[in-house]
Image (cartoon, helix red, strand yellow):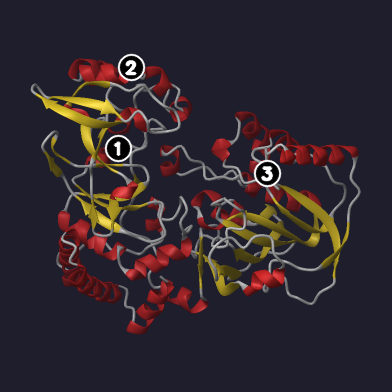
Amino acid sequence: MNGFSLARFESQTNVDITRKAPLFLCKFEVGKLDSQSVDARAQMLKLEKDGKNKIWTRVLKNSFAPLFMGKFQCVVGNPPWINWENLPEEYREMSSSLWSKYGLGVGPNAQQVGLGKRGRDMSMLFTYTCCDRYLADNGLLGFMITQMVFKTGGAAGFRRFKLSQDRMLKVAVVHDMVTLRPFESAANMTSMIILRKGEQTTYPVPYVRWIKQKKGEIGDVTLADAMSVCSQEQLVAIPVDSKDKNSPWITAKPHVVNILNKIKGTSQYKAHAGVYTGGANGVYWVKILEKKPSNLLVIENRHDLGKKDLKKTVTEVEVDLVYRLVRSGDIEKWKYRSENYVIVPHTKATSWRAIDESTMKSNFPRTYSYLDGFREFLRNRPDYLLRRKRYPFYIMFNAHRISFMPYKVVWKRMASKMEAVVLHPIDDRDIGRKVPILQETLSYIPLKVENEAHFLCAILNAVEINALVRSFSQMGGKSFATPSILDQVRIPRYDPSDKTHRKLAELSKEAHSLASKSMLTELEKTEIEIGKCVAELYQLSDREVEKLEAEV
């Protein structure tokens, strides 16, 4: 049940709860509840019985009111996990001063803005508010919380662990329960944090990863039973950027952290996310039914995609603005496919602004007429209303001149391991030779030189980089391998005069060719050679590479 409980306690156990287990025995002295508290509790129970344990707007509205009196030595609970963009505008405005008060209102980076994301979760604000209002000095707070607060750039403010300039929070331990999936039928990335009020967080932080040893859900069991079917890995957590304590955490075994320090750093390259339709895939994504003379295509929109069914439309459009589309499911290590198409009303010259309406009407009248049939739907996209109202109604998001670069090193943004591939222009019988356009669920590095692209692809597919990215990313989540990973990976600029750089480029080309022919034995040998070159690049010993291989 999404809520929280408060209690005073006297410990009656010698178990060190900050290191051994997320549960402990204690004697509770329940605080007195005022009439407002009783009403809130009754309201929460009714919502639970009615099956409305989702976004409880009335509960949210009152969650920051002084429902309980006094301070407590222990606060335990499960705060609501609700993304900022899913909150009604009323609640965004209502809580805005609190986000600022606790330094949690860190603005999104340009990439997040381009994708309409803010990277905030209500559990962050709830945690700080409860620590401030209900937790006594030197008291402990234990909250179930989403793992994203430790792994994503948008949660940097949360990792300040400060209520104010001189009031600190110490992370005593984090328990990673992602693989346990403690909430039935939910795919949430679940963790538990224990904070002590009045002390400063010091690194490394103890980080316990729970691993389920049997299939299926564990269910409601005792601690002893849970321990019997689970194992625990004792890891440590440190900021991935040693100069920025608010940066995402590396979580790994202590000896592995020392090896990863040789790889992490700043890349000489910048990555980006693919193009985002703002929830209008059913408009922009199309099937080609027929190629006609005079530069025209007969297309049908993918009307059944997305949360809202759109009208099925079969019409003619100009070939100029139709491209191959590469989606997340099209990408594998060393290879990809592209069987879908997308209309992109942008050019290299217009970049993110899109083609203006007068030019569209003049140069691409049929494409304009097709998009105009969805005018109201496109104008009501949330991201259009928030950020692009002054621009053509058919504008896309995160489309730039770099979207049309000839070579791209591409990997999945939502995955559990790095799998990169080099994309290049495709000869298509219907639309001609064009560079594919990428969906926003993909990250990529745009490049002009083929050898440079393959050099980067070889490095990104190496076990060393995979181990590093997995250590500071949200495994299996939406923030596993965002474009920002390159801020933490030390990749040198390609130097064609460097024999190791040239060899990596050639080996990547070979790997792509072998993968396309499914020559797996030969591919494995090539990957071993790539690993040797990458180890040489980062000056890693064979023993150090073996330790990283054991982690992935």
Q: Please give the label number shown on residue 195.
A: none
Q: Nearer the viewer, mark 3 or mark 2?
A: 2
Q: Are the residues flagged by discs 3 and 1 in contact, CB closer than 8 Å?
A: no
Q: Position of residue 350 (x, y in %)?
A: 26, 30
Residue at screen point 43% across, 64% down: 470
What secondary structure is found at the residue carrying circle 3?
helix
Q: Residues within 10 Å of mark 2 (few under 14, many from 20)?
A: few
Q: Is residue 409 left or right of residue 506?
A: right
What secondary structure is found at the residue carrying circle 2?
loop
Q: Identify the residue under disc 3.
A: 101
Quadrant in which the C terminus is drawn? bottom left
Q: Identify the residue under disc 2.
A: 373
Residue at screen point 23% across, 56% down: 335
Residue projecting furthest to the left? 293
Q: Position of residue 424 (x, y in %)?
A: 18, 48
Q: Position of residue 161 (x, y in %)?
A: 65, 57
Amino acid type for the residue under numbered disc 1: His
Earlier-in-chain disc, 2 versus 1:
2
Amino acid type for the residue under numbered disc 2: Gly
Q: Is residue 41 above or below residue 346?
A: below
Q: Is residue 341 above or below residue 313?
A: below
* Residue 410 in view, yes or no: no
Earlier-in-chain disc, 3 versus 2:
3
Q: Please give the label number shown on residue 400.
A: 1
